[in-house]
Image (cartoon, rainbow, N blue to C red):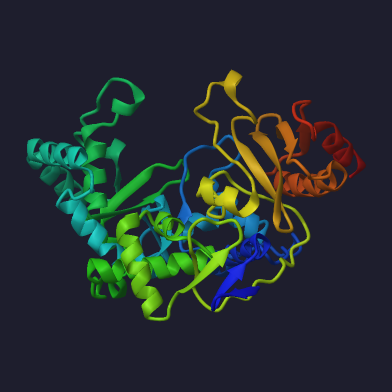
Amino acid sequence: MLKVAGSALLSRREACWLAIAAQGLDAPIGPESRAAGVGRLGGLLDRLGTIQLDAVNVLERTQYLVPFSRLGAYHRPLLGRLSGPGGRWFEYWGHAASLLPVELYPLFGPRMAGSSRDLVRRPLAEERRRRWRSEHASYLEAVLAEVAERGPLAASQLSDPRRRAGEWWDRRSDGRRALESLFTDGVLAAWRTERFERVYDLTERVIPDEVLARPVPEPEEADRELLAVAARCLGVATVADLADYFWLSPPLARLRVAELVEEGRLTPVGVEGWRHPAYVARAAHPRPPRRSHATLLSPFDSLIWSRERTERLFGFRYRIEIYVPEAERSFGYYVLPLLLGDELVARFDLKADRKARALRVAAAHREPGAEAASVAPAAAVELLRLARWLDLDAVEVAAMGDLARTLRSALGAR
């Protein structure tokens, strides 16, 4: 790491090292016979600060893939046991719908209070929310009373769910909207069933008493603390990167970051090729990753959430093509990048065909400059590891992509 004009200047590779280490992707995964338990799963979320939830299950839901990428095989139902009444994790709007360590719950108090006043920083959205609450005030009270009496409840279990017809974006029932409003306000807390259905109950019956007893900080203090957590979890990041981690307002984040720098909790650094200053949570000591094997990353993995940052760090342009018509996709429907060392070297369109008990590789593409002869064997090991964890018997590679043929040979060799 160089020094320029009294401040640190990181090379792009050193920035990658910091990011990979902060995300828990730098150390080798142990033998598969040593499956991760509750303790290691809980420690992982403490390290990451948040894991995004997503319903797409063509391969496996992202909340299960993120721990697998870092810890290797584990018993998936353990994840559900960590959230819910009295659990170490809670669900809220962190980075989209997310699992978060329960210790962070007070930091979201100001966000919950703002929601209860319909303060969402978008005037039209605020007006729609206020109008809906006003028109459905008595219904909201009835839903809350029913949860208090009968909870925990999913939206489908309400005695008067008030279902709606229409297109998918307008199909949510009034019952679901009522529960979501109360959840976002912090009046209700929620967790997921195995089918990914959200279940709601009174917050005091879900979040531990000792957590609820802690004081709720002022909004500025809460934002500072969330930005400090984001800096630790990202390793090195611009203001925009830090704000994105917990979906904070970038203009307000800029003020809070300046305060963290003044307090000595963040240190400004430059990064080779970056237009904006970056920040590290402590004295930066970038070291090469010790992990020599390849790692598949969920499309919603927190290492690559910010597509712009992913491109800055790795030179890897990544877009999710789930909503792109099939004929217009460049790489496929559900595409996972492959991390090898400190580079993203390939991407694979994957599907778990549970009926046929096969992991299907619909497309396999290597990145420019990546050598197929070295990438394919590493990818084969990782794909077989993933298939075993998903209880699939085979990995089947289609002909699509410039890495497909070499990958098929590598798999055959194993």
Camera sees residue 148: no
Q: Residue at x 19, y 37 (%)?
A: 124
Camera sees residue 196: yes
| Number of marks in the rendered image | 0
Residue nearer the viewer, 51 or 370: 370
Q: Give the percent coordinates (x, y) of residue 95.
A: 41, 52
Q: Give the percent coordinates (x, y) of residue 242.
A: 43, 60
Residue furthest to the right in view is 413
Q: Residue at x 79, y 45 (%)?
A: 370
Residue nearer the viewer, 364 or 152: 364
Q: Give the percent coordinates (x, y) of residue 210.
A: 30, 75
Left or right: residue 70 compared with residue 202: right
Left or right: residue 237 compared with residue 122: right
The C terminus lies in which quarter of the figure? Answer: top right
Residue furthest to the bottom in view is 264
Residue nearer the viewer, 352 or 355: 352
Left or right: residue 164 compared with residue 233: left
Q: Residue at x 66, y 29 (%)?
A: 355
Above or below, 25 relative to 369: below
Q: Residue at x 24, y 57 (%)?
A: 112
Above or below, 10 relative to 295: below
Q: Give the percent coordinates (x, y) of residue 24.
A: 61, 64
Which of the 4 image quadrants contains residue 372?
top right
Residue furthest to the front in view is 5
The N terminus lies in which quarter of the figure? Answer: bottom right
